[in-house]
Amino acid sequence: MDAILDSLKTSEARQTPARPSQQEVEDAVRTLLAWTGDNPNREGLLDTPKRVAKAYKELFSGYDADIAEILDRVFEEVEGYQDIVVLKDITFHSHCEHHMVPFVGKAHIAYYPRAGVVGLSKLARLVDAFARRLQTQEAMTAQISMAIEEYLNPRGVAVMVEGEHMCMSMRGIRKAGSTTVTTRFSGVFEKADEQVRFLTLVRD
């Protein structure tokens, strides 16, 4: 639980080792290239270390995301609307923390507002903030839910994540097309009928 709560904080607030320099990252990539059996000095791979470093900076940009800033504005002028809000089919790309291999899929979020609603694009940004890190799907599901609970204080939150893990389809057991589903329900969504309503809206 402490690890999940810590993940909601900004990167500045977390106790993390100092980041390696650009040169150190590129040297590490060259080592990996040589370890695969290829030649890091051949023409096609000369710029690969620089490209990998640039790509990783984008793919793991979630570590620099400020969750409080993403969910900082709530719109209260909603004509008293207090029913369910659902945003489904939020695509994401993440990386398994065990093998650093991608897993991709969709996230579905619902909440019952207490004192206003947040912009829908903010929920999509929230998913990206946690997906663009080394992750497990279970932890990512919990992090999304707990962030909404902490910063929006809704009457309930429901999160479902569906993902295909390349560590299963590209390596190991090599079962392409299998999907992992994780859920987390809080507040009013702890009731079975509300879970059914959420799942019905997501699957409709």
Image (cartoon, rainbow, N blue to C red):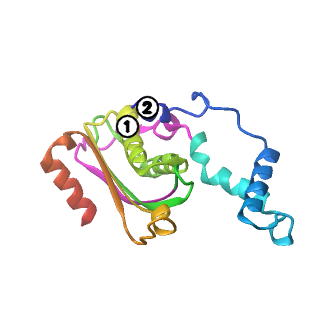
Quadrant holding the N terminus:
top left
**Nearer-the-camera pick, 155 or 63:** 63
Can residue 166 be seen? yes
Range of residues picked out in magenta: 65-94
Secondary structure, mark 2, is helix
Q: Is residue 35 magenta?
A: no
Instruction: Left or right? Give the position of 51 relative to 153.
Output: right
Give the CA distance from mark 2 to mark 1: 8 Å
Is disc 2 surrounded by few (<14), some (14 to 19) or many (20+) residues within 10 Å?
few
For badge 1, the amino acid type reads Met
Residue at 51% across, 68% down: 170
Q: Nearer the viewer, residue 94 or 74?
A: 94
* Residue nearest the observer in this picture, 106 or 80: 106
Residue at x 31% of width, y 44% of height: 78
Which residue does the numbered mark 1 point to in the structure image?
146
- Judged by depth in the image, the label closer to the viewer, 2 or 1, is 2
Of the residues shown, which amino acid type is indicated by label 2?
A: Leu
Residue 64 at x, y percent in the picture: 60, 40
Mark 2–mark 1 CB contact (< 8 Å): yes
Residue at far left of view: 193
Q: Position of residue 123 (x, y in %)?
A: 43, 48
Report which residue position mark 2 lands on: 5
**Relative to 28, residue 203 above or below:** below
How packed mark 1 is, by other alpha carbons closer than 10 Å (few <14, some 14-19, many 20 or more), is: many
Q: Residue at x 38, y 39 (%)?
A: 148
* SS label for mark 1: helix
Rendered position, 10 above or below 112:
above
